[in-house]
Amino acid sequence: MFSRDAWKEIFETIQKNKLRTFLSGFTVAIGIFIFVVLYGFGNGLTNTFNKFFGDDATNVLFIYPGNTSVPYAGYKANRRIEFDNSDLKDIEENFAMFIDYVTPRINGNGMVKYKNESNGYRTRAVGPSHQYNEKTIMMKGRFINDLDIENKTKYAVIGRLVEEDLFGRENAIGEFIDITGSSYKVIGVFQDDGGDNEERMIYIPYSTKQLIDKNTDKINQIILGFKPQIGYSGAMTLEKSIEKFLKSKKFINPNDQNGIFINNVADNLKQNQQLAKVLQLIVSFVALGTIIAGIIGISNIMVFVVKERTKELGIRKALGATPKAVIGTILLESIFITTISGFFGMMMGVVLLSSMGEKLEAYFITDPYIDMGIAIFATILLIICGAIAGYVPARKAARIKPIVALRDE
Amino acid sequence: MIEIKNLHKSYKMGSNTLHVLKGINFNVEAGELVAIMGSSGSGKSTLLNILGMLDVLDEGSYTLDGVPIINLNETKAAQYRNKFLGFVFQSFNLINYKNAMENVALPLYYQGVGRKERQEKALKYLEQVGLKEWAGHLPSELSGGQKQRVAIARALAAEPKVLMADEPTGALDSKTSYEVMDLIQKINDAGNTILVVTHEPDIAAMCKRIVHLKDGVIVEDKKVDQVRASEYVQ
């Protein structure tokens, strides 16, 4: 069946039936091509989601104060809740088993000056561990440390773009900048995957900020990094218990939805990933549909091909072709065409995907790719189905009595 | 060469059964040139198909070159056809995308003959039918007579024991018919056994023996003095 002559025979048949070969090959190639591209786009979508949420740590809770909506324990409704340094300490002590770090964040913004350059920037007064939850990457110098907090030093860590704006090509480390009237020494420059906004940020020690703000101990929000080992359900439980703890401490009705807000990054991420997965599923479903359409297409063509060749097969049988030889010829031809065009379509799809890269980012598709395993599996599936689709009519044709096939009418 | 005893064949047409061959007894010796004649519906083509193993018999026995042809599966039938028989059809039945030489070489391919030898043999037989220069042409580029000569060359290529021609001249004009018959006679002169199914008396007269079929039985079986087709060919 696999002799050189058999192949020669197949090549001759293919060569002399170009349109037929082209049509069946085209069906297969386009089927695989669309499958690969769609599946790759699905992956690109997931990539975009991961990129959106990948720049921050995922084992993080953001705790914001709000306004109460119901009266409780002698307090009126619509009371503004505020956090202060004692809350930090309390959380740190009560939940030590589950948490890695706690850091406050006090947001601010203002004019920042260096020599003749000045610009408005957002500032964040934070603790040392803030570096972890934002995944801040130090390019040079260092981040704020415990000593800075203790001594309330006037040090600033500036974003890459802040340095670029204010210092141009100069080195910012050791220079003094003016932030809303106070002079700070630049001790570090950082970069962040979160985009330009993140890199136009200035970090200062939260204790310094509190000192400047009339020696207050208030903080805007508490950021808490929990131990990743506690897992997703552990994080949900931790979120609940912290909420309960803070509500009792701040005299908030346990059923009040507005006193305290907790933003669980892990939960958000999970939801978004689920959305991405659903999208991927839909895209895969469409891609699968394409494959099935391809299979139906190749089946149709094979039925047609065998029908068209019935007479020829009858002649061959009259000349001594055994049923095995007849089936072999048709099958080998169909497998050959589907294999070549299937892999051609697959490669075209893969090439298109890899050339895309960031070009479709506006459509939420980043770096689309397909697992080669899946691409090859789909191609082989189509080849096998094409072979089966060819085998059924081929077997039928091989059974036809030559005399029936040769009948003129 | 061919021995047929009490051959019966019927076809089912819906609920009716059409009894086509009703007990045929018939022998052919090696080197004979037999014409099977009869009007349409007499069963002559059915007989040829059974002889050619293109169709199976219902009752009776058929021995070809000492081999009983019975209970053949498709594969065995294909092998026997390839080994024993060469076919020439009224409508030529050449494979239209293969050129003359490739068509002639096809039975050799199924015999498992090597490519080079196939081509050599195919050219040899094309030369024998006078179409060597046309070896590279497709059937669509050949005239009816040429097509039939290619078909004859193809039938000969497998070096069969018996050559079976079903209305070989049915689609040809008289002049071309005589040319084809001339070729068949020459092949017969070389010692080949040939059966020709025809309903044209002048073609039958060019054979050495005429078997007349009517309503599924042999009504006449006589040896005749062969008319040489070459007399009509310039």
Image: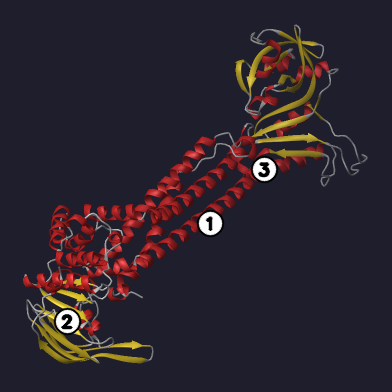
Instruction: Point out the tag, 3 or 1, that comes first from the N-terminus.
Output: 3
**Quarter of the figure with the N terminus of chain B:** bottom left
Quickly name the residue at label 2: B204
Report the side of A81 relative to B186 (left or right).
right
Q: Secondary structure at mark 3?
A: helix
Residue B121, x across and y down, in percent: 13, 58
Quickly name the residue at label 1: A289
Quickly name the residue at label 3: A267
Q: Are marks 2 and 1 on the same chain?
A: no
Q: Chain of mark 3?
A: A
Up the image or down, A199 lies above or below B158; here it is above
Up the image or down, B67 lies above or below A227; here it is below
The amino acid on which the numbered mark 3 sits, given as a three-letter code, is: Asp
Whole-angstrom CA distance, mark 3 to mark 2, is: 95 Å
Residue B171, x across and y down, in percent: 27, 73
Q: Secondary structure at mark 1?
A: helix
Q: Which mark is residue A365?
A: none
Q: Compare residues B124 and A42 and report the one nearer the observer.
A: B124
Residue A275, x across and y down, in percent: 64, 47
